[in-house]
Amino acid sequence: PGASGRFNFVATLTFPASMFPVDAVVTFRLTDDTDSAKQCTFTWKAGASSLSVNKSSLSLVNGGTGQTVNVTSNDDWNVS
């Protein structure tokens, strides 16, 4: 669709409950067709975990226009 095209997607990650009371680290990488990538790392703390975002969808523009998403969590996370 070119530089002004839109791509809708839904990513669902499902992890089984840990059998052990230890932190769990999950890392995944998102790469577009120009090889521009972002790496997301989440550390779920042992015990009850929560993570939520304040937007149900985003429209990302091929041109670097920034958008803000607020993330609330009792776990450690990073996107770089």
Image (spheres, grey):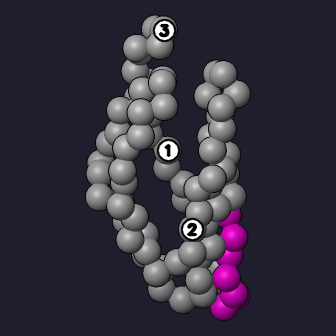
User: Which residue matches tag 3?
Assistant: 2
Q: Report if residue 21 lies within the magenta region.
A: yes
Q: Using the numbered discs, state the Cα–Cα distance from disc 2 to disc 1 in whole angstroms.
A: 17 Å
Q: Residue furthest top?
A: 1
The label on residue 77 is: 2
Q: Using the numbered discs, state the Cα–Cα distance from disc 3 to disc 1 in whole angstroms.
A: 23 Å
Residue type, mark 2 in image:
Trp
Tell whether 13 sits left or right of 19.
left
> Of tags 3 and 1, which is closer to the observer?
3
Q: Secondary structure at mark 3?
A: loop
What residue lies at 47% left-to-right and 13% top-to-bottom?
A: 3
Tell whether 36 sits left or right of 65.
right
The label on residue 11 is: 1
The answer to whether mark 2 and mark 1 are in CB contact below 8 A is no
Q: Report if residue 41 lies within the magenta region.
A: no
Residue type, mark 1 in image:
Ala
Residue extent of the magenta highlight: 20-26
Q: Residues within 10 Å of mark 3 (few under 14, many from 20)?
A: few
